[in-house]
Amino acid sequence: MKNLRLKSGNIPFLFLITTVLAYGLLIPFIGFYWDDWPFAWIAKFMGPAEFNPAFAPFRPFLGPIFYFTTSLLPPLPIYWQGFALFIRFMMGFGTWWMLRQLWPERPRIAVTAALLLIVFPGYSQHYIALTHINQELIPFIFYLFSFGYTFKALRAERPLTYIIIAVLLQICGIFPTEYFFGLEGMRALFLFFFFSGSIFSRVRETLKHWWPYLVVWILNALWLVYYYRFGPYNSYEVTSVNNATPLSLFMDVLDTLWKACLYIWIQVLVLVSTHLTAPSSILTLGLVAVFFVFISYFYIQHFKGTGESRNFALSLMFIGVIGILLGRLPSLAAELPLRLQTGYDRFMISMMIGSVLFAIGLIELIFKDSRFRMYVVTAMIALGVGQQFYNANIFRRDWEKQSEIYWQLSWRIPALKPNTVLLTHQLPTEYEPDLSFTGPINWMYAPDYTPAGNLPYALIFSEKRIGGPTLPSLDPDTKISFAYRTVNFRGSTTDTVVIYMPVNGCLRVLDPVRGDADIYSRLPDTLVNTIPLSNLSRIITDPDKPAVPEFLSTEPEHTWCYYFTKAELAMQMNDTDKVIALETEAVSKGYEPEDPNEWLIFIEAHALKGEIKDAEKLSEKIIKEDPAMRKGVCVVWKNLFIKQNNMNARQIGIFMNEIKCSE
């Protein structure tokens, strides 16, 4: 008994180590993503209480959870990523505690299930912390403990207290989000296999003990039917009843089972194999190897002996398959796809328990040799740690790109007139739509915002919004409006500034006066067609208090993009001396652009200052390095030809012929 207590005391520490190695190594370099931004903005500027009305049209029972957590934590990424570690640890601890109540004689199964759930590789959205902690993970923890108290009640002499606790936790788990509607069916499965005897007696005992939870489940179903069909809900629509066919449903079921039962456990090997020599792949595989040695040693020390019976293994697999399908029900009903390594794999959260139990059952059934079985299990856990580290590196790169955007935007646009729209085709990040960027844009340019008025600024992706209610058309004076949870933005296409940031290059403010519609004509029409709307007078070039992305850490080193954005701002202010000085300083430090279009502003500056020869040399250099730049260079010289006096115009015309601008 003393040894057993020692093991049980060590196990939570094992969960903590696993959680930190899987999710904590890159925390200082991970930020906010997706819906984190509007939620962080609300918490900062509207206050935690605003989440209650903000969620009323969506998931009204989520509001109190957001209210509670945002009252505890400030809206800064480091706090939420740290809190996510605690929540992930609690998911593992809750799974372990729940299975100990269900199968106290099977400690190895409980520990294995908890470890696999901690590192569950099918769910990549852990790092969208502010959103998913509140929206999914906390309700999921409630459900885990609800299951545990159900079986604690079955073993107690006075079970009523535990039943009440289990029902209250069930309510807290099932009502905030529809994700876990199907999860309740697993409680009935656990109960069925908990009891012994004939099928009839098992069904009878199951119903006898399940009925309080069944009542809550039915009430939740009625609520969902009302709220999603007839009530105020205005997010996803349940459409599969009308559109799905038996064949499409069957194929979706097969796809779900393939991913949740098998593929996710080896997914990281497939991902790293595409770039095997990349530093991130090498680090991922190294972490897998180190953790495999560590976790194997733990299993050798603590879990020696025979495996589980064939019947128990089959029951785990059966519970697992049904649990996966039950977990898929809500997203399937909304015809939402299950795509791994995208935002859509958040639907895996409700399939976690089923997937883990199926995997354990399959291993127990196939591998009879205890040592080989142990190595298979520990390899799966280690691969899960590697998968989550691999995911963390993806989010690290995304946060790095976000930070580049915010800093470059602050350098190029020191301030904006209120009711301005920043319009672009898209930005080179993976997880943030336009409404996500709207939060930090307002944070930067309206740091003193109070909840009394409309939202001062908006960032809109023309690719997604043209022709819709937000951006009906690109005609001048077209109204632009949308609701940002409980506040509204109202603007106009006349009050827009068009920005563009390539995957490799610096952020630009596009200017129709400089011929950017011609220079960037090869880009998608959803960007090019917006350039005539770009109104640079909306930019306040010399404000008393320039915008700063205060939600980021210290300002990064000033490399090429700093000098370019500052030069573009100086050109807007007609300060060609400063433009050339910035170019000289950048080049002297060895910086140069990734996007050759960024040289064009310096050609223009040299020519406007009368340094025609310097402008010609730079033009020839650019065309020689990249012949495709001829068009952009010629656009600049054509504009210069119009602006110059007679003597320079003749010289410019000769040079334009030399570089074949007439072709």
Image (tube, helix red, strand yellow):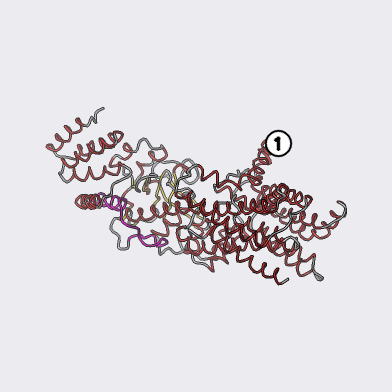
User: Farthest left residue?
Assistant: 647
Q: What span is colored magenta in the figure? A: 546-573
If the image is split into quadrants, where does the C terminus sit? top left
- Please tell me how crowded label 1 is: few (under 14), some (14-19), or many (20+) other residues with Cα within 10 Å: few
In-image side of 10 versus 205 (left or right)? left
In the image, 485 versus 243, the foreground residue is: 243
Please say whether residue 179 is visible from this viewpoint.
no
Please say whether residue 363 is visible from this viewpoint.
yes
In-image side of 530 versus 52 (left or right)? left
Give the answer, above or below, for where 623 lies relative to 99. Answer: above
Q: Residue at x 23, y 38 (%)?
A: 621
Give the answer, above or below, for where 572 lies relative to 8. Answer: above
User: Total marks drawn?
Assistant: 1
In-image side of 253 versus 38 (left or right)? right
Whole-percent x, y for residue 352 in the image: 65, 53
Amino acid type at image mark 1 = Pro
Whole-percent x, y for residue 376 in the image: 64, 50
In the image, 21 versus 515, the foreground residue is: 21
Whether the magenta-drawn stretch holds residue 547 is answered as yes
Whole-percent x, y for residue 474 in the image: 41, 41
The part of the image, by quadrant, that contains residue 336 is top right
Residue of label 1: 246
SS label for mark 1: helix
Whether the magenta-drawn stretch holds residue 14 is answered as no
If the image is split into quadrants, where does the N terminus sit? bottom right
Whole-percent x, y for residue 491 in the image: 42, 51
Q: Residue at x 24, y 31 (%)?
A: 661
The part of the image, by quadrant, that contains residue 457 is bottom left
